[in-house]
Amino acid sequence: MSAQAQNQELARYGLPRWRVSDVLWVGAIGIIGGLLYRFVFPAVSAACGAGETQPWSSLTNGVWMLAGFLALGITRRPGSMILAESLAALLSLLLSGQTHAEIELAGKTRMVLHPLVFTGLLQGMGGETIFCLLRYADWRFGVWLISAAGCAWFSYISGIYVTKCYVLFPATVQAGIFLGTFLSTAVLCALPAWWLGRQLFEKSRP
């Protein structure tokens, strides 16, 4: 679809309309992302020191947002980043067999849905919010960078309030984690998603 055809679609319907091919792309990316999240990326993150107190260890955090960015870059459809990222997170948990976690509530141990499910949802929401506000009509690289910042911020919030993996770190380390997450998301996710979108939309013919 060309940029002209996309603008005509926006003028007629208000938002881009989903097609069967978009659903297939988002599903495929979510499944592949889930496989990568389960079998490949954990080893990459561990090798780079993820989870340690050094802020530079967060420079690999961007790989965990890749599925959502690629889905939105390829389809440019509302909700595609949220759907792909959530599907990838859920599939990775199902493959690991850790779909639930134990928490202490009112003096009793209770089983709840694993917090990483909500992390995938939050990351997708954080990355897609800026495109939603712009009605999916602006795909410049600067918008993708803002999206990367939103994704990094929601990921940080998840690390504080959902998974609580950052709460014991000093404020300076937390700031470094956020910055490292933003930089890695911008380079590993926003840049390739923006480039793919240009190849598929701006440079195509009506």
Image (tube, grey):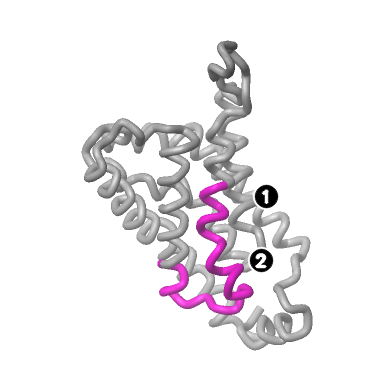
Q: Residue 89 at x, y = what percent? A: 57, 39
Quarter of the image for residue 98 reads top right
The furthest residue to the top: 108
Q: Nearer the viewer, mark 2 or mark 1?
A: 2
Question: What residue sits 73% from the left and 62% below the top?
Answer: 21
Q: Which residue is mark 1?
A: 27
Magenta span has 174?
no
Quarter of the image for residue 164 reads top left
Quarter the N terminus occupies: bottom right
Q: Which residues are magenta?
A: 122-145
Instruction: Name which residue type carries label 1.
Output: Gly
Foreground residue among 196 and 11: 11
Q: Residue 198 at x, y = what percent? A: 51, 76
The furthest residue to the front: 106
Cβ–Cβ under 8 Å for marks 2 and 1: no
Q: Residue 129 at x, y = what percent? A: 56, 63
117 displayed left or right of 157: right
Give neighbour class at mark 2: few <14, some 14-19, many 20+ (Cα, 10 Å): many
Give neighbour class at mark 1: few <14, some 14-19, many 20+ (Cα, 10 Å): some
Question: What residue sits 24% from the left and 42% below the top?
Answer: 173
| Earlier sequence position, callout 2 versus callout 1 | 1
Foreground residue among 98 and 74: 98
Q: Which residue is mark 2?
A: 77
Instruction: Name which residue type carries label 2.
Output: Arg
127 displayed left or right of 25: left
**Above or below, comparing residue 179 to residue 193 in the picture:** above
